[in-house]
Amino acid sequence: MQSVLYNDEQELLIKLQQGSSTAFQELYNKYYGLLYLHASQKLQDREAAKDIVHDLFSNIWQRKTTLIIQGKISSYLYTAIRHRIIDYLAKEQSKTNYLDSLSMYLDNKVSETDHLLRERLLQEHIEKVLKKLSPRVREIFELSRKQYLSHKEIAEKLNLSEHSVRSYIKEALRLLRAKLGGLLWTLLVLYCKIF
C-alpha cells in the first residue's frame, strides 16, 4: 500500500488542479477499489464497472485544471459514479428494448423487402426534416439519438448546460412529431392493409 502524501483533501484537490500526477495517483489509489466495488455491485458486471470507473478517472484527469469539487472528494466521486451507472443502465435498457422490439418484428415474419423500403422512405423523410433544423439543434439531436450520448455528456462536449441540451432536443422532437405525425399514421394504415 502506498503512503499518503496529502493529509488534507483540499490540498490533494489543489495539487490535482495544478496537474500533479502524484496527487492524481493518490486519488486513484484511494478511491478506485471502493468505486469499482460499488459499481460492480450495482451493475452485476465487472467489466462494465471497470470501464465506468476508469472512464471517471480519465475524465477527472482530462478536466483536472477546471475541475471544481465543493465538499468532500468522496461525495463527488460517488455521485459521479452513480450518474454514470444510471446512464449505463439507461443505455442498456434502451438496447434491450430495441432488441426485444426487433425480435418481435422478426417473429411476425414481416416481409423484409417491404420493411426495408418503408424504413428507407421513413429515414429519408426524417433526414429531410432534420436538415430543416438549425445546425446546433441538429448536432445536439444527432449526438443524442445517433451517438447515444446522455444530456450530461453532450453538455460537457459542447460546453452547454444540461438544461440547454434538453431544450434543443425537445425542439427537435417537436418538429419531428409535427412533420412525421401524418406520415407515421399513413405508414401504419398501409402496413395494416398489407398484412
Image (cartoon, rainbow, N blue to C red):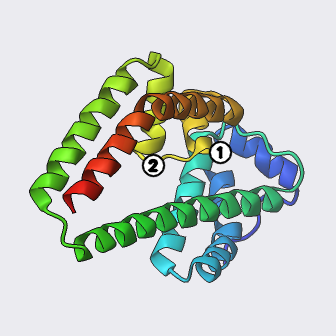
Q: Nearer the viewer, mark 2 or mark 1?
A: 2
x and y percent of residue 21 in the render? 60, 49
Which residue is depicted at the point 59% across and 79% down? 40
Q: Position of residue 118 (x, y in %)?
A: 21, 46
Report the front residue among 126 and 36: 126
Vertical comparison of 64 with 41: above or below: above
Does the CB distance between marks 2 and 1 fall below 8 Å?
A: no
Provide residue 26's location: percent of width, then percent of height: 68, 61
Q: Nearer the viewer, residue 189 or 41?
A: 189
| Secondary structure of residue under mark 1 | loop
Q: Amino acid at mark 1?
A: Ser
Q: Amino acid at mark 2?
A: Tyr
Q: Which mark is residue 59?
A: none
Query: Going by the image, does 8 lie left or right of 133?
Result: right
Percent x, y of residue 116: 16, 51
For label 2, the crowd category at 10 Å Cα-Cα, with few meaning under 14, some 14 to 19 and many 20 or more, is some
Q: Please determine whether, in this image, residue 109 is positioned above or below residue 190.
A: below
Dot 2 corresponds to which residue? Answer: 148
Task: Relative to 55, say whether 165 is above or below.
Answer: above
Which is more N-terminal, label 1 or label 2?
1
Quadrant of res 35: bottom right
Mark 1 nearby-residue class (10 Å; few <14, some 14–19, many ≥20): some
The residue where tag 1 is placed is 20
Q: In percent of the image, x 62 and y 74: which residue is there?
A: 39
* Left or right relative to 113: residue 156: right
Calculate the distance from the C-alpha at mark 2 to the C-alpha at mark 1.
33 Å
Residue beneath the point at 58% across and 58% down:
87
